Image (cartoon, rainbow, N blue to C red):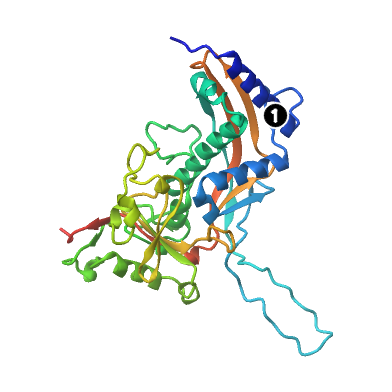
Amino acid sequence: MTHTLSDRGRRALDGLFTAIAQVNGASRGVAHKFALEPAAEQRLEDLQREQVGFLNRINMMPVPQLKGQVIGLGSHDLIASRKSRPNLPRSPKYAGKLQDRKYELESTLFDTWLPWELIDAWSRFPDFAQRYARHVAISVALSRIMVGWNGVEAADDTDADANPLGEDVNVGWLQKLRLEKPAHVMGRAMVTAGGVTTATGAPAPIYIGPDSDHAVGDYKNIDALAYDLIAGMPSYARASTDHVVIVSQDLVDEKYFPMVNRPLATTIDGGKSTSDQTVRDIVMSDKQIGGRPAAIAPYFPEGTMLITPLGRADGTDTSNLSMYWQEGSRRRYIKDEPENMAALVDYNSVNEGYVIEDTDYAVMAENITFGARP
């Protein structure tokens, strides 16, 4: 039986529509496509970071163009110099790392629907509009993280059934490293096509266990693997004190992450995680892996380890992982669609992409398996 929206729910919904239209100057109302005002765009980004803490550990960068040069945050070329005479011209340098690397943003849809039953339930609360905004922000933020770790291509038409982790939505951080710095990837065969080599070949498993033999590329424990990965960085990158070892939950046990064994509420990923925090935030361990802080991130793929600088939760430093989004590219319209499962349908889109600011500072191993090589 189709749910009928109550009068209280209708008033709450009409109030929501009016508030969103006023904030964004949508003179024709929210049922017509409108662009978000710059202040509204930034509020949306801020709300996502507030609700999903992992986004505070990466850079969320607005950029003016769909394509451009990677900014190079968090890494720096030498800027110090001296001049022997006052009349010699001075040569200012970019306070970052200039690299011949480009970014390209893709239009991404974040369309959601909310059943009238839930709208009726929420309409009894005076903060109905804020609850709705948080609900959408969390959904968008978690999808962004999922694609960031698992995305391998930007398909013209995505298929969520075949790619449940957003593998076809956009090219995420791990795939960027496979494409842009294949020498920094272990656990996958190299492929050369058109004179370009990438780490996108068949899995080449790395085995970890007391009987594993380093001579064939295997390790006694994950600490040894982490040390070897860091040793593969350039010397100036190895010296960074900001590196974090991000690992999949299947690679660590309670001695590293005691909280992952604490059962909490049903998780948003269907029960894969045993902690609500591992779904919406990054879990930092008080233990170290390879002499660096260890972390579990939401939706990080199994059998994988990534070592790279991450920002601190208070935002006092810069991460090596970024999301770029195009200023003024957000489009939105909201419709009350009785024909669509009796629901409020919220259509959102934005041009965005995933960037590793400096690939010298990122190394990864994948297809990690426990046990001796067969």
Q: Is residue 92 left or right of residue 350?
A: right
Does 82 sit above or below residue 29?
Answer: below
Residue under the point 72% across and 42% down: 38
> Which quarter of the figure is the C terminus placed in?
bottom left
Residue 25 image-quadrant placement = top right
Residue 251 image-quadrant placement = bottom left
Residue 318 image point, x, y percent: 57, 62
Nearer to the camera, 252 or 225: 252
The answer to whether any part of residue 40 appears in the image is yes
Does 121 sit above or below residue 35?
Answer: above
Furthest-right residue in view? 87
SS under mark 1: helix
Does 328 sit above or below residue 123?
Answer: below
Residue 238 image-quadrant placement = bottom left
Q: 10 Å neighbourhood of mark 1: few (<14), some, or many (≥20)?
A: some
Count of numbered tags: 1
> Which quarter of the figure is the N terminus placed in?
top left
Residue 209 image point, x, y percent: 20, 63
Does 41 sit above or below residue 236?
Answer: above
Furthest-top residue in view? 1
Nearer to the camera, 281 or 366: 281
Residue 39 image point, x, y percent: 72, 42
In this figure, which residue is indicated by the disc labeled 1? 19
Residue under the point 45% across and 61% down: 181
The answer to whether any part of residue 299 appears in the image is no
Mark 1 is on which residue type? Ala
